[in-house]
Image: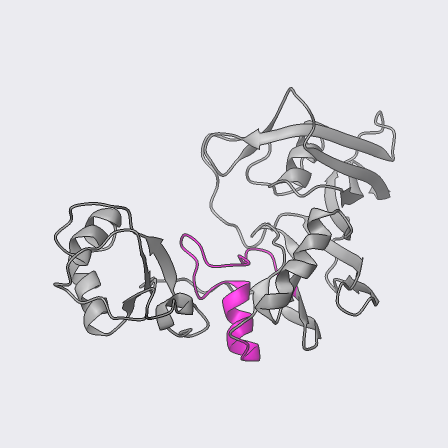
Amino acid sequence: MSQLLAHGGLPTRHGVGPSCVSLPAGSWPTFTDFLAERFPAITRTTWLERMAAGLVADEFGDPVTAQRPFQGHMRLYYYRALPLEARIPFEAAVLFQDEHLVVADKPHFLPVTPSGHYLQETLLVRLKNQLGIDSLTPIHRIDRETAGLVLFSVRPAERDAYQALFRRHEIVKHYEALAPWRPELRFPLQRKSRIVQDQPFFRQREVPGEANSETHIDVLQIRGEQALYALSPVTGKKHQLRVHMNALGLPIRNDRMYPPVDVTPDDDYARPLQLLAKSIAFTDPLSGESRRFESRLGLFLE
């Protein structure tokens, strides 16, 4: 009996692995009919072209053809394609690489992984192509708008050992941010609150209830009405630092979402979010070695 194949046997193409869709039970005549209904933004013609090129396969590695009858309760693999993907004009730097880890210094505006309108223009895909490591996977992520350190696992089997450090809060992370100076606040301070998904879905907000997020905040430098802050997140909720700073009346400079606005402005490459993942430290779960990495990027008060 055939064994399941990783990614349906489809290889990585230009640094991008195939996407996966799980099939429910249903009465679609063919796989093509299901895919055309499930992904209305992709034309039927596009699916037929992908099938003809051998770019759609089931979990056993068998090709999905135009007239192949639908079968539920299995997975299909296929390649996403973005016909027009604008180049993000900033480059990442590799700060460290060995047989287990890659540490990159990510620029502002570059997503960590493919999603939405971003595929080739992501840190993961660029690094796969640059380093020739198809197995590279992120251990954690930072916002697209945030710059700084991102860790990647070279070997998939070792990824969970590193991710467990984040789950157990055994990673020491320090960020820096530029924001207004409020002399009435006493630093250092601790912000603990409950953060939940807001509307639209990509925005977060604080609500009453048991805290699920915690950040330690201190001041590094003051110049006039602005300050450089040190932020140390204990937890890792989405947009946590941006939400906490805004709740304190300290919105991070050039933040397009906090405080909330009705229409999120488009990217302005001249005005990057002034938030930087500056350093990260931990005890390596494989070697027991103490590791510390620091971004070469910086934020500066004007």
Residue 4 painted magenta? no
**How many numbered dots are placed on residues in this image?**
0
Between 207 and 108, the one nearer to me in the picture: 207
The chief SS type of the magenta part is loop
Quarter of the N terminus within the rendering? bottom left
Please tell me which residue is depicted at 66% across the width and 55% down the height of the picture: 163
Residue located farthest toward the front when viewing the structure as drawn? 1
Structure colour scheme: one colour
Question: Is 295 rendered above or below residue 185?
Answer: below
Q: Quadrant of residue 78?
A: bottom left
Instruction: Please state the horizontal and vertical placement of residue 264, each as a whole percent of the image.
Output: 48, 38
Residue bounds of the magenta highlight = 105-133
Residue located farthest toward the bottom when viewing the structure as drawn? 132
Q: Is residue 106 visible?
A: no
Q: Is residue 239 left or right of residue 37?
A: right
Instruction: Please state the horizontal and vertical placement of residue 10, each as a whole percent of the image.
Output: 36, 72
Instruction: Please state the horizontal and vertical placement of residue 177, each as a whole percent of the image.
Output: 73, 45
Please tell me which residue is depicted at 68% across the width and 72% down the height of the picture: 100
Q: Is residue 25 left or right of residue 196?
A: left
Q: Quadrant of residue 294?
A: bottom right
Please tell me which residue is depicted at 33% across the width and 71% down the height of the picture: 2
Q: Is residue 61 left or right of residue 271?
A: left
Instruction: Please state the horizontal and vertical placement of residue 113, each as a whole percent of the image.
Output: 51, 59
Q: Is residue 103 visible?
A: yes
